[in-house]
Image: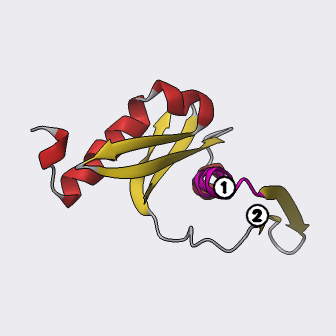
Amino acid sequence: MPLSQLHAGDVTTALLKQAQSSEILKSTNVELTTINDRRYLISVGVADLKDGQKKSKLNAIRTSKLSAEEGAIKFFEGSKITTQEHSKVAQSNNERNDSYQSIQSEHAGADTGVYIYLGEWVNDNFYYTAIAYPL
């Protein structure tokens, strides 16, 4: 089926396939594309799975999603974004390690919160999350 005749669900699938195979996204993590005469910005976040532990996977999921959002915001607004990773270790009956990532953004107030979630995948011990913004 030609790209100009795709329905909404098919558009999401086509955008995900492009995110997974695009040479441009491999180097820049953002790309503009057109489907059904509508333009989209695709942004892909990447995180290292490290040791394959369940906690590492959860952190990679969160980090790759935030990275995809960060890439889109940078593209839209050229804003300065500071990413910090924090770790806390608490002692009790069990030792607990909580990691989280916070993003602080200084931007001019454009609404970049409405995006299409495309999907996630793992390749070569890296976790990827793809999102798209209709333009």
Q: Position of residue 133 (x, y in %)?
A: 45, 58
Q: Do the residues labelled 1 and 2 touch (CB within 8 Å)?
A: yes
Helix, strand or loop at mark 1:
helix
Classify residue 52 by image quadrant.
top right
- Give whichever of 122, 34 is nearer the camera: 34
Q: Residue furthest top?
A: 23
The residue labelled by disc 1 is 70
Asked if the stretch drawn in magenta spans residue 99, the answer is no
The amino acid sitting under disc 1 is Glu
Rendered residue at 21%/57% (across/down): 9
Dividing the image into 4 quarters, which one contains the N terminus? Answer: top left
Out of 81 and 77, give the one closest to the viewer.
77
Q: How many marks?
A: 2
Query: Magenta residues?
Result: 67-79
Q: Residue 103 carries which label?
A: 2
Inspect the image, locate mark 2, and give the three-letter code of the amino acid beneath it. Ile
Residue 125 location (% of width, % of height)? 57, 32
Which residue occupies 15% across, 49% down? Answer: 6
Disc 1 from disc 2: Cα separation: 8 Å
Of callouts 1 and 2, which one flags the residue occurring earlier in the amino acid sequence?
A: 1
SS under mark 2: strand
In the picture as drawn, the residue positioned furthest to the front comes out as 37
28 and 17: which is toward the camera: 28
Left or right, 26 with reference to 20: right
- Would you say the magenta stretch is mainly helix, strand or loop? helix
Label 2 neighbour load within 10 Å: few <14, some 14-19, many 20+: few
Corner quadrant of residue 81: bottom right
Q: Taking 97 as reference, is 53 left or right? A: left
Please name the residue shown 33% across and 38% down the image: 17
Q: How crowded is mark 1: few (under 14 residues within 10 Å), some or many (20 or more)?
A: many
Considering every residue shown, the one lying at the far left of the view is: 1
Q: Is 70 located above or below residue 34 in the figure? A: below
